Image (cartoon, rainbow, N blue to C red):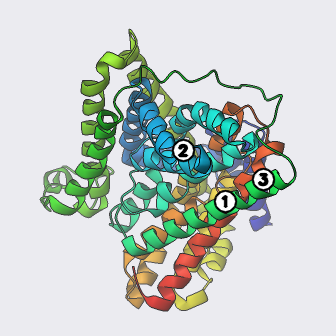
Amino acid sequence: MEVFGILLSLFLLMFMAYRGFSVILFAPIFALLAAASQGFSVMPSYTELFMAKAVVYVKSFFPIFMLGAVFGKLMEGTGFAKAIAYKILQIVGKDRAILAVVIAGGVLAYGGVSLFVIVFVIYPFAAALFKEAGVPKRLIPGIIVLGGCTYTMDALPGTPQIQNIIPANFFGTNVYAAPLLGIIGSIMIFAGGMYYFQWRLKKAHAAGEFYGEGHILEPDEADTSALPDWRLAMLPLLAVLSINFIMTNVYQWNPNILAPFLDMKLPLVAPAVKNVLAIWSLIIAVVIGIILAIGLGYRNLPKGGLATALNAGAIGSLLAIMNTASEVGYGNVIASLPGFKSIADALLGIHLGGTPLMSEAVTITTLAGITGSASGGMSIALDLMAKDWLTWANAIGMSPEVLHRVAAMASGGMDSMPHNGAVITIIAVCGLTHKQSYGDIAAIVGIKTVAAFAVIFIHLVTGII
């Protein structure tokens, strides 16, 4: 009955998220329902456990959410993101329309622009390109997902997306962890996704289907006459990547820099620099990227555009961070319940390959699917079980870098369920429906998930990281 109460709580949370209700409201409700069913007092479970863990998450990752959102909005508002996307589509051309959209999304995502900005930037160009090339419009959402939130989100080493930052906080690694495995995984996802969509296009053409007619939310013809120089537009993205690399791999952080703060007995201070190095490096990199975007693109912003971009990014980040923090709080309430011990034992009991990697991958991808969030599912899993996985890895001499890469890649697989916020947004922006386009998104999710487990197999066979 104890396990049943937890599973019922998870089902209810997933159901409400699927129906469009905010997890900020319903995560604590279902967490406390599960706690009460197993004899825990409701109020302390809420204020001392749920809220305490949510606050820890906000403390650790809010700067990344906020600065990333502001950077994305500035790249959008200055026209820089649009200029980069248009140039890539122009170079690759209509004969390789699918490849052009995947590359454009990948470049923007790897440069630190969020998927929620990428879809608005790329969709108008993709629609025009696909219409000219005779590619069915219903494929656009899945192709944007392939470019913007698969290999460039969590597999390719160095990506500044939050899914690649979170594991560093738990394993003392950095965003370049297990670079060879990350590159191999990226190639597998890219190649598998491209093969899938070429097959889908060939099948559509054989059936006499092309772009299609009667679509809604068709974009006006994109005005490219006023776009800024794409080379100028690339500078903020390159700054984020290069400064992040320098601060992570070249700059020597003082290992005693935290000592005065530890002496103050402040709450929530990181135990060592290595636990926050990835976050500090990215904060510095994105701040420099923001300054560059403002300095180079200020004249391209409409009147009041700077305030609009800064405010929209800051306010938008609040919803994102609170959604994930609520899911983390929920996970920790569930983990405190007696019934969770048997679930945790079962997950830790996955000994395939004699390493914690299968246990980690199964746990994270399952929780990401349940919550409909890569960052949320991974954060819950790592908060609950990272110490066990790390202890296990240390005992067998496995590098924590492998744990980092597998965690990141596993989070970005089953997270893209129908109730995922990004999935809903992409399909809606393109003027399509789940019935028309979700099948292709699900296929990419499948390829991404297979790649995460394939990387585990490759590491176990070859030992490369």
Q: Seen in the image, is 123 located left or right of residue 200?
A: left
For label 1, the crowd category at 10 Å Cα-Cα, with few meaning under 14, some 14 to 19 and many 20 or more, is many
Where does the image place residue 337, in percent across and percent down from the top left? 64, 62
Up-down: is 128 above or below 177? above
Cα separation between marks 1 and 2:
27 Å
Q: Nearer the viewer, mark 1 or mark 2?
A: 2
Residue kind at label 3, given as amino acid type: Gly
Looking at the rendered image, the quarter that the C terminus falls into is bottom left
Viewer-proximal residue, 138 or 61?
A: 138
Secondary structure of residue under mark 3: helix
Q: Are marks 2 and 3 in contact (CB under 8 Å)?
A: no
Residue beneath disc 2: 93
Numbered label attached to residue 439 = 3
- Choose between 289 and 8: the one closer to the eye: 289
* Of callouts 1 and 3, the N-terminal one: 3
Sort mark 3 into few (<14), some (14-19) or many (20+) by Cα contacts within 10 Å.
some
Residue 68 image label: none
Circle 1 residue: 445
